[in-house]
Image: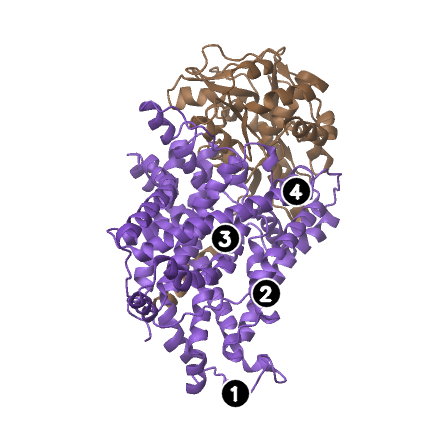
Amino acid sequence: MSLKKLTIAALITLVPFASTAVANDKPTLTIYTYDSFASDWGPGPQIKAGFEATCNCIVDFVGAEDAISALRKAQLEGDSTKADIILGLDTSVAAEAKSTELFAAHNTDLSALKLPIDYTSDQFVPFDYGYFAFVYRKSDFPNAPTSFEDLDKAGEDFKFVIQDPRSSTPGLGLVLWAKAAYGDDTAEMWPDLKDHILTVTKGWSESYSLFLDGEADMVLSYTTSPSYHKIAEEDDNYAAAIFDEGHYLQIELAGVLKSSKNQELAQSFMKYLVSQDAQKIIPTTNWMFPVVELEGGLPEGFATPLTKEQTLLLDDQDVGANTKAYIDAFFAGIE
Amino acid sequence: MPSLPALNNNKTRSRPMGGTFPLLRAPRLLVGLLIALCVGALICALIAIIWQAADLFGNPKTSSIDIFHLLRMSAIQAGLSVLLAFVTGSIVAIALTRLTFFGKPFVLAFLSAGLVLPTLVVAFGLLAIWGRAGLINDIGQSVGLGKLPFTIFGLQGILAAHTILNGSFAARIFYDRLQALPSASLKLGQSLGLSEWQRFTILDWPVLKSAMPGLGATIFLMCFTSFSVVLLLGGGPANATFEVAIFEAVKLDFDLHRAALLAAAQLAFCLFIIIPTAGLKSNSVLIGASQNHLWAATGKVKWIIGALLFVLMLTYASPLLIILYEGFDPAIFKLISSRKFLNALATSCVIATASATIALTCAMLLAFARAELIYQNAGATSTNILRTVISAPVFAYLATPSIVLALGFFLLARFAGLDTSKVGIYVVVIANALLALPLANATLGPPVEKIANKHFRLVKSLNINGWRRFRFIELPLIRKECAYVFALGFSYSFGDLGVIALFGTDDFSTLPWMMYRALGAYRSNDAAMLAAILLFIAVFSFYIFPKILGGRDNAHLQ
């Protein structure tokens, strides 16, 4: 009976998975992060190799769907969590993360960091940053839009695609961006733009695919997205539309958990994270800006950071207290 | 060897469940009930534990979710999807029974492939055909016809994607049921000179109707909870889903009370669909030896149904064919020889084999338990509570958002003291098996009950019970369906991984996961290749498993 054989085969093949524990004397530093950071294409593998070369430890990146999931996972695990560090949180969830009271103070000297605007936190170490922006094909737009208002003037058929602020980081970034640029006037801005919204996807990947497939003229992404096409694909046809209102900043953060039994090791990882060695990995793996001035400069063809005047950022506490209201207003505006 | 002595001694019994401890004398019923209750208890435990955990990790916030709006939108969309799937599916199935042509087995293997792919892949395939930059617009513009006058984004897009996903599955199930029409009936009908319409109303319709409750409930639930397709093609927040609301509750707010409540509300609503259909009996009146007899259509009818079949098959298959086309890239050889790919493939195969085995076993045992009711009932056709209890829990997983399954399983593992970083693969196997179970159940239920309806007298008079009944009566007749269910469970489990979200580790990867990772890292080329490979594996398994497991074509009792 072939069915029976298959059953037995299935059971046998499952057994090896039951015992994956590896005996090792070295301490393991467990870092919860978002999946694309930990994946082969992301910075994870190189950062792991770089830190392991000096720490006499094992670095274990555990990828969750996104950084907030990684935090929730650690929360649900409580004291029994293996996580020493949560990496990948950002300025839009920093207040929420802080309110969990799970994070220890970091002892990292951040004075050498070069961010577009001052950002201080006693619990979180910034490790890269980027600006939300609409990305387009140069061949489609001889004159790219230079403001939110321009989006409405780009023609009747003009469509852009965005992400749901409840499930996606850039999606939430757009809501905060509009708030920072227009304050309460966003209520009037969204109804003008809603006819140009092709769809609101769950995550960034789906939006970006729609854009690449030609279904949308623009996609909400980062100013650094064209750098990928230019450097990795040698395709110069992509650009980010630079708006007069300025661009909302996303700073990605890492924090050490109080419950970690490897406090010292975790703190030294934080120092490594903002070192030249780790930072030079960031641009062409995470496609974000490094937080220090790289010795060799940014890779050729990489985007340039915007100026302080072009940078928008709402206060962490303001975001933490009002995110829900901002999201509700956004949906009311485009409904 | 188990046997059922009780049956023969109760010839005069009028009610199905007479006697003091009837269940003890019907092990098949007992096993089926046990499985159903376990499945039901597990889903309740998953939601309850989230509610419990909310007290530990409480963070209640106010929310402005309009549950009734969400319910209404999802119900309309799912109801229309079922209707479209039934209409297109039955046309294709009827046409397939009346025509023979070269490549028919390939068409049949292709019919179920859409359903088991990650839904996003099918949605992107649909866009590649019907989208603004799709094939039809390209052709239209190059021959001077201009652009399509409509957009695929909106309710029409959601319905189109759902029809491709489910209509072809419905076609496959309907076709199998129609194939089981007895040759004798067909020959009789043919010699009586029934018109095509009479053939449909007298022979085909009762068969189609008997498959509709289970199939309809399954499709409805899949569309009701279809999350990524609705958001991708929905064209705006008006088509938001329960799942996004739960995402918000779990992730942004960490309000687990609300998450549990929303999940329970969705489940409760779905029960209105599940309970009535679970109680319905698939009283297939036409029973007999299965057909090798082809009553082919002739003349004008042949051309009409041939044309309909061609158009519908083209609609079903074109989004899939373009996935294959777009994934064909010389770089594919480098990809499939990479270690990461082979690891992911191996993991996917193990998960798929284990899930398919569990789903098939449970579906068989549940079907046998329902059939047992028929044997005990002497073929009577009333619905009863036991039937509902056995059938209903199976559907519950389809009605539960994957983030809730993930969270529930995670909390269960944690409170049971298990190492959550190690149980991930088992959770994926169990969850995938349970998600495939409704499909397996809808496929396997009707034929097993048909056998019971036909053979209950024989079984009684010969006292063929337990293992012997399975080995000599049931298995030969349902082998083909079992093989199909295995293929279905296998490729379905290749596809889904929503439940792993909280368990994930870097060294655990499946093919669909690899695909999503590629998408999330700008590697749309790799993602396209992986999508094509997934589709190839799905079609291949629908072709190969029936060959390996399905037995010979003529293994039917006369």
Give the number of the disc on residue B38.
2
Q: Is residue A183 above or below residue B220?
A: above
Identify the residue at the far left of this view. B102
Distance between mark 4 and mark 3 Cα atoms = 23 Å
Q: Position of residue B460 (x, y in %)?
A: 45, 84
Give the number of the disc on residue B250.
4
Q: Is residue A142 above or below residue A19?
A: above
Of the numbered discs 3 and 2, the one sitting upstream in the chain is: 2
Question: Which is in the foreground here, disc 4 or disc 3?
Answer: 4
Left or right position of B236 against B440: right
Q: Which residue is mark 3?
A: B425
Question: Which is in the foreground here, disc 2 or disc 1?
Answer: 1
Q: Which amino acid, by three-letter code, is at mark 1?
A: Lys
| Displayed quadrant of residue B388 | bottom right
The subunit letter for the residue under badge 1 reads B
Distance between mark 4 and mark 1 Cα atoms = 56 Å
Question: Which is in the foreground here, disc 4 or disc 1?
Answer: 1
Q: Which amino acid, by three-letter code, is at mark 3?
A: Ile
Question: Which is in the foreground here, disc 3 or disc 1?
Answer: 1
Q: Which residue is mark 1?
A: B11
Q: Are marks 4 and 2 in contact (CB under 8 Å)?
A: no
Which hue is chain A drawn in?
brown
* Secondary structure beneath label 1: loop
